[in-house]
Every structure is written in structure tokens, then in C-alpha cells.
Image: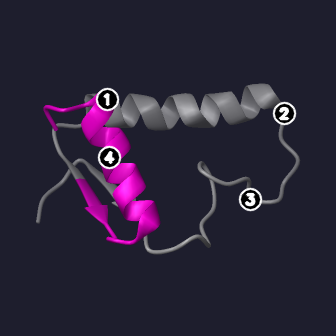
Amino acid sequence: MPYDVLILSTGSSYLAPFKNDGMQTTAEERKAEFDAVRTKVKEAESILVVGGGPNGVENAAYLKEFHPEK
């Protein structure tokens, strides 16, 4: 299945950009990570969310709310 962005939402054990990976980062560095993800999502023509649990449903709902055309 072709896609531009893949979001794996298979549970709560995941790393950056959604959770800090344990390394000390500044607020500016975290913001830059989030901004990079937002840019990828904005530019994507399609998005595939894998996982139908709470994380997958939450991510899909946010995507649909902010990008209903995707």
C-alpha cells in the first residue's frame, strides 16, 4: 500500500518525536522535532495509520480533525 507518511501506533512504548527518547533536549529542540513532523504530515498526500488501539485511534482522529482531506 503506497503512502507518504506512516504512523505506527502499536502501543505506548514509542520514542521521538512523540515521547522523549531519554536524552536531555531543550524546549527549542523538541519544538523543532514536532515542527519537522508537522511539515511532513502537511506535505503528505496520504497518511497510513497502523494500529487500532487508543494511540492509533487518537492519532487518526487528530489527523482527520486538522487534515480532513487526507
Residue bearing the label numbered 4:
61
Q: Along the polypeptide, which appears first: circle 4 or circle 3?
A: 3
Location of residue 10 in the rendering, given as x and y in whole percent from the top left corner:
44, 74
Separation of disc 2 and disc 4 at Cα? Answer: 28 Å
Q: Which residue is mark 1?
A: 66
Residue 11, compared with residue 61, is above or below; it is: below
Q: Residue at x 88, y 47 (%)?
A: 24
- Residue 33 vs residue 7: left or right? right
Which amino acid type is shown beneath numbered disc 4?
Ala
**Circle 3 sits on which residue?**
21
Q: Contact (CB < 8 A) between labels 2 and 3?
A: no
Determine the CA span between mark 3 and mark 1. Answer: 26 Å
Q: Which residue is mark 2?
A: 26
Please tell me which of labels 4 and 1 falls first in the chain: 4
Picture residue at 31% right of the left edge, 51% below the top:
60
The mark lying in front, picked from 2 and 4, is 4
